[in-house]
Amino acid sequence: VQLVESGGGLVQPGGSLRLSCAASGFTFSSYPMSWYRQAPGKERDMVATISFAGRSRDYAASVKDRFTISRDNAKKEVYLQMNNLKPEDTAVYYCHALWYWGKGTLVTVSS
């Protein structure tokens, strides 16, 4: 199983980023997918989860109405559209499926 995140970077407060996670090695369309994040000195927390068919989504309260999770089962990819980013969104963002993790992509929100 491989999960490879991309799309992180430096963005100003109020800006947007779109993270992508490319999955391989398992039946992608059969499993829910999640994004987690870990800020320096803090625990890794769930940001968003999407069901295997994409019909159900769940978000952490801190990102609801700003972030959107989506997936493309044909491409075996999951995405996280992040709008109105805040400095407190600064973290390493991880893609998660089953008991596997990607290596993460760093998002830094700073002016």
Image: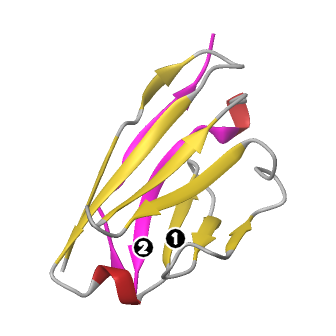
Q: Does residue 36 sit above or below 105 in this rendering?
A: below
In percent of width and height, residue 41 lies at: 59, 54
Residue linked to disc 1: 34
Q: In this view, does 55 lie to the left or right of 86?
A: left
- Residue 33 in sight here: yes
In the image, residue 19 sits, relative to residue 61, either above or below, namely above
Counting from the top left corner in percent of width and height, residue 13 is at 69, 19
Quarter location, residue 38: bottom right
Residue beneath disc 2: 96
Separation of disc 2 and disc 1 at Cα? 5 Å
Q: Give the range drawn in magenta.
A: 89-111
Amino acid type of the residue that numbered disc 2 sits on in the rendered structure? His
Q: What residue appears at the point 72 percent right and 37 percent down from the top-left corner?
A: 88
Residue at (61% x, 18% y) in the render: 110
> In the figure, is residue 51 to the left or right of 6?
right
Which element type, helix, strand or loop, lies under badge 1? strand
Residue 99 shows in the view: no
Element type at mark 2: strand
Would residue 101 be found to the left or right of residue 91 on screen?
A: left
Whether residue 77 appears in magenta in the rendering, the answer is no
Q: Position of residue 89 (x, y in %)?
A: 66, 40
Query: Which of these two is toward me, 111 or 3?
Result: 3
Amino acid beneath label 1: Ser
In the orientation shown, which residue stands out farthest toward the top? 111
Residue at image point 56% right, 48% down: 40
Counting every numbered tag in the picture gives 2
Query: If the image is split into quadrants, where does the N terminus sit?
Result: bottom left
